[in-house]
Image: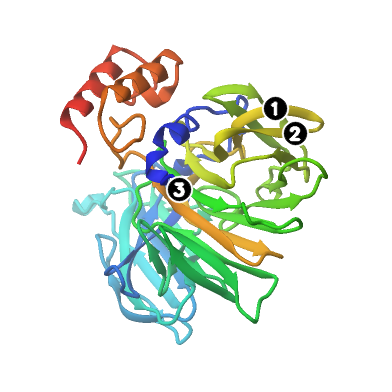
Amino acid sequence: MKRIVNSKVLCGALVLSTLAGIATTANADDCCRWELKVKRKAILSDNFEVELWARFPDDKYAFASGRVDILSDDIDWVDIGLCGPASSPGSTAGSPSATGDVLSIIVGQLNFPPASIYANDDNPILVWCGEFEAEGGGYRTLQTDTTSMSYYPLRESSIQESCDRVREAYRSVFVGPIVIGPWIASLLEGTIGTPLRGGLVLEPDATAPREFGASLTVEDAPWAPQTRFEHTIDVGSMPVGGALELSYYPWWLCSPWHFIPLDITLEKIEIPGIPPVFDVTPDFDAIGVPRVPMRLMLGGREVGDPILGGGASFRLFNPCFELTWCYVLNQFDQLVLVLKCENPFDIEIAGQRYTVDAIELDPRQGAGVVGGMDRVEVIARDMKSMTIADAGFVGETGCRADCDGDGRLSIFDFLCFQNLFASGDLAADFDGDGRLTIFDFLAFQNAFAQGCD
């Protein structure tokens, strides 16, 4: 089994393209929103530290005030308090409830130029901190529920303006997770999970013979353009009629939806006399994208750009048994979902057949709408078991000079980089300026000379 950490070149080539005519939505900098940062206190601890940050429009001066609840369930707050500069008189940390909510958090800061009192203009600005404990298993969600939020438009004025709209924050944390290398899993109800060779085998228990699954995530992972969250599912033993349902929960930022996932269904069908066939049906209608633009890739080249109609599916012929799904923020900070194999396979869309090794699905969201991935849910139906062969991030945290992904530096990495550069592949954009120039050669050379840890 090839580990994801060694597939940088294959996946890296996929994050470089954006389909023409991407629909624009409100930029994340143009609205007010809360941001929740949640961190596990220790590797196997189920105590979590929480920070609440307020973000206001970039062209305004400073955060002024806000009243908000933090909603959750089945958690116990160990500590809550105001933190950061937004703790002027009248601010309060709120009151924990028996159900896990924290109600009536009031935060604010003064801006009174006549007395030379100026508000802190950090954006976002830290306003509240807490710690909670959770027991048992599964995952818990935290989300904000806003009563009001305002900002100071000008430094030299004490006048506040209310936010026309406020985007809520949403985060989930895994309690008692199964830790598998760099990623963790939370079993869904009715699921038995067994770690095996860097992966996770899922099976139904007696209460759920037809449906079982798990949520996957990586905690404290960096999010930036060209970072990828991959998960590889072994479909070799998938029976005819069996189905996988994949739900991606992004951190939607400034968008009309808050907690809505992107859903994809993969079902194995039987066509007599030919190798395995799978129907794949994306469903992005909940975020207002009934027609899904696609980009078909082979060896880093585009071989087609069909648009999948609302509710339609495409068909895979003889793909690799270990299908890898890849959540991507491309170099334009826009969301792309990728399905890929290490070997070519055929895809059929509306009667047209193509040979590909990767398929990009474009949810048509503008830059800055997605801040990262909260979690991925994988649910199996009418299957005896399912294997998640691997999961985790493939991004700039790896050794970039190891271009061929074999875990060591050699002349073949130079050849790999040279081929990427010659083909115009922005995976060779080592200096990050969005262009391929002699400076990328110099940056690669320096990275190679520094070696890999």
Q: Which residue lies furthest to the left in this view?
A: 450
Q: Residue furthest front?
A: 273
Of helix, strand and loop, which one carries label 2? strand
Q: Name the residue under label 1.
A: 354
User: Within the image, what quadrant is residue 219 found in?
Assistant: bottom left
Residue at 64% x, 81% y: name it: 206
Tags 1 and 2 touching, CB below 8 Å: yes
* Residue 411, placed above or below residue 227: above
Q: Which amino acid type is shown beneath numbered disc 3?
A: Met
Q: Is residue 162 visible?
A: no
Q: Which amino acid type is shown beneath numbered disc 1?
A: Tyr
Residue at 52% x, 50% y: name it: 232
Crowdedness of circle 3 by 10 Å Cα count: few (<14), some, many (20+)? few
Residue at 68% x, 51% y: name it: 266
- Mark 2 to mark 3 CA distance (whole Å): 27 Å
Q: Which amino acid type is shown beneath numbered disc 2?
A: Glu
Q: Position of residue 112 (x, y in %)?
A: 27, 54
Point out the image quarter for the C terminus. top left
Q: Can residue 280 be seen in this view?
A: yes
Q: Nearer the viewer, residue 268 or 293?
A: 268
Q: Mark 3 points at which residue?
A: 1
Q: Position of residue 72 (x, y in %)?
A: 48, 74
Q: Nearer the viewer, residue 380 or 84?
A: 380
Q: Mark 2 points at which residue?
A: 348
Q: Earlier in the sequence, mark 1 or mark 2?
A: 2
Q: Where is residue 349 in the image (x, y as percent from the top left)?
A: 76, 33
Q: Which of 328 and 100 is in front in this view?
A: 328
- Mark 1 to mark 3 CA distance (whole Å): 26 Å
